[in-house]
Structures are given as C-alpha cells and as structure tokens.
Image (cartoon, rainbow, N blue to C red):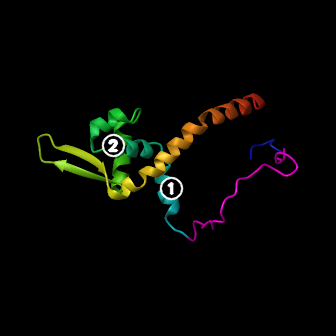
Amino acid sequence: MSEGHTDVTTSAGPAGPEVPDVPDVPIVSCAEECGVRDVQDRLGDKWTVHVVVELAAGPRRFKELQRLVEGVSQRMLTFTLRRLERDGLVSRQVYPTTPPQVEYSLTETGHSMTHLIKQLIDWSLDHRSTIARSREEWDARHPA
C-alpha cells in the first residue's frame, strides 16, 4: 500500500457487486502443490506466449521466429527457447548443414497449452476496450 493511501475500498451498492456463480473449487496453496508457481512464472514471462503462438503454426527457424516475435532481442529469444526446451514445451532440431540449421517446434505438451493461450487472447480482445476505459477513468481520478 502506498504512503498516504488510507481510503477504505467499499463494495458497489448495499449488497456488493454481483458475482457470477462459480463452482466451489478448492484452491491449492503453493506449499501443497510445489512447482505450480514455477510453471506459471514461465507462462507469464514477457516472451513465452509470443513464441508459443508462433510455434503453434508450425516449426520455425530461429531468425524466422525473431522476425515474427516483434521486439525480442536475439539474447532473449535464445534464453526463452532454452527455457521452453528445458521444460519440454519446445523441441530443437539441428540439421547437419553448413552452417547448421536449427528448427524449433512445439512438443505434444507445448501444443496441449495452445488452447489456453487462445482463450487468454480471446478474453483480452473481448475486454480490451473495457480495460482501456477503466484505466482512463482511474488515471483521471489519480493524476500523476
């Protein structure tokens, strides 16, 4: 909490905001389920989703991926691909040519998460104007 932030946030209306019915799903703490945070950190980093989206369309060579993942440096793309390969989400195929050609593709496990990423992208597209409007309203109430 920032210094000077002493306001209490209240719910919208006497009964509070309307919350959709959500089935009771037990939330497992990180202490109970080791490794979940590590996987979430991987999926939540800046470049992983972009790389997975591009590889979902098929195998790609390094330079092709670098062109497609706009803004990624060679170093960060290398780092991201190595981490994804280590996690078993991406496979790396080296062809014995001069110079060697390297091709990256999603593994079966990598492909299994593409539907989740598509849902996240769809949600983002559906809600981007609402989020933009909310940001503008918040910024207007909290001038820098």
Q: Residues within 10 Å of mark 1 (few under 14, many from 20)?
A: few
User: For mark 2, what is the residue?
Assistant: 57
Residue type highlighted by circle 2 = Ala
Could you say which is closer to the camera, residue 102 or residue 111?
111
Whichever of callouts 2 and 1 sits on the residue coming sooner in the sequence is: 1
127 on left or right of 49:
right
User: For mark 1, what is the residue?
Assistant: 40
Q: Is residue 19 above or below residue 33?
A: above
Q: Position of residue 101 (x, y in %)?
A: 18, 43
| Rendering quarter of residue 110 | bottom left
Residue at the right extreme of this rendering: 14
Look at 58% across and 38% down and name the residue there: 126
State the SS at label 1.
helix
115 on left or right of 138:
left
Q: Magenta includes 22?
A: yes
Look at 40% across and 36% down and name the residue there: 72
Q: Magenta includes 19?
A: yes
Look at 76% across and 50% down and name the residue there: 18
Q: CA distance from mark 2 to mark 1?
A: 23 Å
Q: Position of residue 97 (x, y in %)?
A: 11, 43
Q: Main secondary structure of the magenta part?
A: loop
Residue type highlighted by circle 1 = Gln
- The part of the chain drawn in magenta is 7-32
Q: Position of residue 99 (x, y in %)?
A: 14, 40
